[in-house]
């Protein structure tokens, strides 16, 4: 089971967004049969089976084992990932494009850049999984509290200069066997975690 899977197919995205199927995916982080799931979610086993077959057809759940139980074979299923992210590729004709309005101070542009990152990293993860290779990535995540808007602006300016300096130090356009990498640095207000 993957930790995070990226859903690129529009039909799989639609299937995963159905409230009952989403609930079944959440329950299937541990292997279960349709009978076990039916008791947990309050649906008839036949209805759960229908949802499981749909999820399986879209690669969101997989067969773990089959057991003989009385006159029937009981299928034990589990989700293919602990969590899922829907790639903008699933909405190909309306996915955000950072090149449409490249304004580094715009929240819309930040979302378009983040969407491109989800799309690209999702595709790279899929390719790496098929090739049975690890995907080399790096992420930095942290929080900072600014005393004023002026401090935030000064930080952004200094951060941009520091990143530009690092890029110019390590970028080698003539490296014959080099591989291009995208660098994304974002600053946005933190969201308060809600307890629920």
Image (spheres, helix red, strand yellow):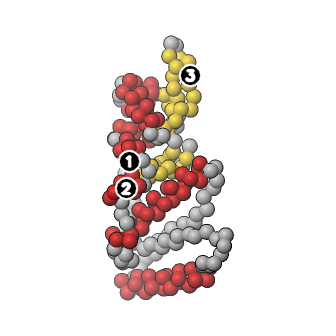
Check disc 3: other Cα within 10 Å, few if <14, some if 14-19, many if 20+.
Answer: few
- Upstream in sequence: badge 3 or badge 2: 3
Provide residue 162's location: percent of width, then percent of height. 53, 83
Q: Which one is closest to the eye, mark 3 or mark 2?
A: 2
Provide residue 109's location: percent of width, then percent of height. 36, 71
**Closer-to-camera residue (4/148):** 4
Q: Which residue is mark 3?
A: 67
Helix, strand or loop status at disc 3: strand
Count of labels shown?
Answer: 3
Provide residue 106's location: percent of width, then percent of height. 34, 74
Answer whether labels 1 and 2 touch (C-beta < 8 Å): yes
- Upstream in sequence: badge 1 or badge 2: 1
Measured Cα–Cα span from mark 3 to mark 1: 33 Å
Does residue 94 appear in this view? yes
Residue lying farthest to the top in this orientation = 71
Vertically, is 157 above or below 60?
A: below
- Upstream in sequence: badge 3 or badge 1: 1
Give me the disc on residue 119: none
Measured Cα–Cα span from mark 3 to mark 2: 41 Å
Quadrant for the N terminus, please. Answer: top right
Quadrant position of residue 189:
bottom left
Provide residue 156's location: percent of width, then percent of height. 44, 82
Q: Which residue is mark 2?
A: 92
- Seen at 60% across and 58% down, the residue is 135
Q: Which residue is mark 1?
A: 10
**Closer-to-camera residue (33/150):** 33
Does residue 39 appear in this view? no
- Left-right relation of 120 to 180: left
- Seen at 56% across and 18% down, the residue is 68
Helix, strand or loop status at disc 1: helix
């Amino acid at each position: 089971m993957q930790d995070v899977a990226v859903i690129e197919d529009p039909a799989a995205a639609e299937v995963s967004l159905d409230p009952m199927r989403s609930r079944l995916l959440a329950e299937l982080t541990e292997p279960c049969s349709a009978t076990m799931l039916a008791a947990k979610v309050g649906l008839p086993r036949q209805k759960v089976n229908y949802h499981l077959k749909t999820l399986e057809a879209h690669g969101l759940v997989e067969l773990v084992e089959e057991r003989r139980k009385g006159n029937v074979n009981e299928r034990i299923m589990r989700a293919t990932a602990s969590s899922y992210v829907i790639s903008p590729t699933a909405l190909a004709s309306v996915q955000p494009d950072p090149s449409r309005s490249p304004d580094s101070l715009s929240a819309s542009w930040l979302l378009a850049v983040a969407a491109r990152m989800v799309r690209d990293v999702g595709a790279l993860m899929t390719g790496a999984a098929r090739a049975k290779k690890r995907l080399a990535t790096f992420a930095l995540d942290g929080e900072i509290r600014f005393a004023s808007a002026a401090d935030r602006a000064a930080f952004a300016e200094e951060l941009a200069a520091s990143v530009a300096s690092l890029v110019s130090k390590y970028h080698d356009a003539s490296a014959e066997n080099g591989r291009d990498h995208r660098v994304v640095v974002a600053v946005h207000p933190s969201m308060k975690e809600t307890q629920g």
